[in-house]
Amino acid sequence: MKESFKVCFCCVRSFKVKTSEPPQEIKTLFDNYSGDGRMSVDEMLRFVIQVQGEKHADSNYVKDIFHRLKHHGVFHPRGIHLEGFYRYLLSDFNSPLPPSGEVINICFTLEWTLTSTEDLQKCLNAVKENAFEVSEYPVVLTLEDHLPPDLQKKVAKMVSKTFGGTLFRCTDEYKERFPSPETLKNKILISTKPPKEYLQTQVSQTSTTDESVKAKKVADAEELIQDEDEEYVAIEYRDLISIHAGNRKGGLKNCLNGDPNRVIRLSMSEQWLETLAKTRGSDLVKFTQRNILRIFPKTTRFDSSNYDPMVGWIHGAQMVAFNMQSHGRFLWIMQGMFKANGGCGYVKKPDVLLSNGSGGENFDPSSKSLQIKTVLKVKIYNGEGWNLDFPQDYFDRYSPPDFYARIGIAGIPLDTTSYRTETDTDEWFPVWDKEFEFSLRVPELALLCITVKDYDSNTQNDFAGQTCLPLSEIRPGIRAVRLHDRAGEVLKHARLLVRFVLEPR
């Protein structure tokens, strides 16, 4: 089969087109686990348990796989042939992550000073009607603290009436320890947005381009805000708040001291986080063992770009604010992190961030003395599906694409690294057959990131798909890795065949 590209009116370039074929290693595995050219239910079960590591699989599980393969036209009552086995490995039901339901993300943006009562009520009604359609875990609504007392009372009445018993109200028993998401299922929590952060947002949106003027406005506001306290908040409004915002009196030196009698949520800019991470990393971890830390972007990100969320996560930060409209590697990492736990929107922090060492010391993600816990081996065999997801001339006008894959780890500094495959030239069905090895000190905080691009010697390489997977949930074995577009939406056909091996040390 040939594929032709028209170069000009009289010239045509033709390329021999390969089809997606099972790699030699897959053929050998099929031969080892099958008989007479077919793989029976019992033989498939043996493969699933021994190679795929699915110890709890039974014959009904395999029969379900065979039933699904009927739709591919590669099923036979006596077993599956090599092509059917290959289709199973590349199928959606052979994902590297445990099966999960579809997650719906809903984002509301309301500026109270410009929003009518009717608009606010519509927003509250929408939350009430859709909050727990997909996940029963709690929903957190953040309200901005620049409301005057009369409006605070009005909002409090609307919120209480709309949500009723689903609204979580913080009692004395939770003053010293936040309840877990597990105990807050089907509850709506009200949080607050610190005045300083709100003012920084407003200042960044002003028309002036003088950075010194903007900085002075923020500094002046901070000096005033540090003297504010919740005693000036309407009592009806204050009683709604279950996640109280703490202030940052004393600057960087004292912001992590906390209050022994009360747990708080501290909001911190990415600049503060980066500074503290370099000098007081273990103190950050200690603070987040009891309190909630929320990170927000610096105000100079006028293009709505994102920052590296791993800096906050590896130090225990529970909330990392993101610009969802800004696509790129950091957004993909965020999306990858929350694929864990069934995509419910909550991921339990690993024990390394929750407990102290044998000597009572807190975890320091920047430590150079951390020992290797796990070796991850990732073998990328091949890929397919781009010819169905993209037009013929999307990557190159006069030839098939030249695909390569970059694979790496996002995690603590010592674990963060990346590699790339060779470029498979002029192929819609690239074959790399390359294995990479990663030595990991804190695999619980690691994410595996894969990006595929089309190589261009004269221009910028073209994006062809990406995925990011939480290492804590990757299933070993040979898996079909679906690729996503820049926004994180799953491409319909593009995918990779990858083998994962996890070896504890």
Image (cartoon, helix red, strand yellow):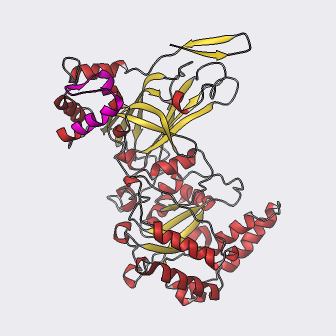
Query: What's the magenta region?
Result: 62-85
Query: Looking at the image, which is closer to me, 309 or 488?
Result: 488
The dominant secondary structure in magenta is helix
* Residue at horizontal 33 percent and vertical 41 percent from the top: 475
Query: Looking at the image, which is closer to me, 65 or 497?
Result: 65
Image vertical order of residue 340 relative to residue 224, above or below? above
- How many marks can you see? 0
Percent x, y of residue 63: 22, 37
Percent x, y of residue 226: 64, 78
Hey, which quadrant is residue 67 in on the image? Answer: top left
Image vertical order of residue 232 relative to residue 162, above or below? below
Hey, which quadrant is residue 254 in on the image? Answer: bottom right
Percent x, y of residue 282: 46, 60
Percent x, y of residue 211: 79, 61
Any part of residue 385 in sight: yes
Query: Looking at the image, which is closer to me, 235 or 472?
Result: 235
Residue 83 is inside the magenta segment: yes
* Residue at horizontal 47 percent and vertical 69 percent from the top: 129
**As drawn, is 201 to the left or to the right of 127?**
right
**As drawn, is 81 to the left or to the right of 243?**
left
* Residue at horizontal 38 percent and vertical 31 percent from the top: 90
Classify the position of the C terminus by image quarter.
top left
Hey, which quadrant is residue 263 in on the image? Answer: bottom left
Any part of residue 58 in sight: no
Hey, which residue is sitting farthest top in the picture? 10
Residue 262 is inside the magenta segment: no
Image vertical order of residue 79 relative to residue 291, above or below? above
